[in-house]
Image: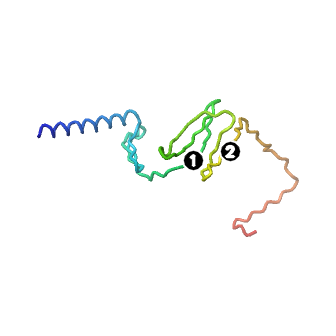
């Protein structure tokens, strides 16, 4: 009986050690269904525990990022099976937006590759009157 107990405890300790090393060197974390997260930060060289509510997000994004000549988008979606699934995908000329409403309204947004700047230099007039009202009662 004592030998069996010792074996069970030894296996549990080895599993805990294995997962701790896996998290430490892979950058992964353990997420619990309530939203808590246990992980290791190589930047600060410490173990971190985050506890926050796991709020289901129906639709969020897309957020468009530019990396050189490549455009990618990041969005969050939830289904009945998967909550808060983060998806990154490459986009070309437009990105589809899904509104977080009952109808799941969708529309496309054209991406701009060039952003023209307006003229920032204007000719100065002969006379200029500047009025300032710091309290906003003017």
Q: Secondary structure at mark 1?
A: strand
The C terminus lies in quadrant = bottom right
Q: Which mark is residue 107?
A: 2
Q: Position of residue 21 (x, y in %)?
A: 33, 34
Q: Vertically, is 126 above or below 22? A: below
The residue under the point 57% across, 47% down is 59
Category of crowding for the residue at label 1, using alpha-carbon neighbours closer than 10 angstroms: few (below 14), some (14–19), many (at least 20): some
Q: Is residue 42 left or right of residue 19?
A: right
Nearest the viewer among 83 and 52 is 83
Task: Say if mark 1 contacts mark 2, CB within 8 Å.
Answer: no
Q: Is residue 7 left or right of residue 133?
A: left
The N terminus lies in quadrant = top left
Q: Position of residue 27 (x, y in %)?
A: 41, 36
Q: Position of residue 135 (x, y in %)?
A: 69, 67
Please report whichever mark, 1 or 2, sits nearer to the chain's N-terminal start: 1
Q: Quadrant of residue 94?
A: top right
The residue under the point 40% across, 44% down is 31
Q: Secondary structure at mark 2?
A: strand
Q: Which residue is mark 1?
A: 59
Q: Is residue 38 left or right of residue 107?
A: left
Category of crowding for the residue at label 2, using alpha-carbon neighbours closer than 10 angstroms: few (below 14), some (14–19), many (at least 20): few
């Amino acid at each position: 009986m004592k030998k069996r107990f010792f074996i069970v405890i030894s296996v549990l300790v080895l599993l805990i050690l294995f997962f701790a090393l896996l998290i430490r060197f892979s950058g992964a974390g353990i997420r619990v269904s309530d939203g808590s997260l246990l992980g290791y930060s190589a930047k600060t060289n410490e173990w971190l525990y985050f506890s926050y509510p796991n709020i289901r997000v129906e639709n969020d994004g897309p957020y468009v990022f530019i990396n050189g000549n490549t455009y990618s988008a990041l969005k969050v979606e939830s289904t009945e099976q998967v909550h808060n699934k983060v998806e990154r995908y490459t986009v070309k000329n437009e990105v589809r937006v899904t509104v977080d409403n009952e109808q799941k309204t969708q529309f496309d947004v054209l991406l701009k590759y060039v952003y023209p700047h307006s003229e920032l230099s204007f000719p100065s007039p002969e006379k200029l009157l500047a009025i300032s009202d710091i309290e906003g009662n003017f």
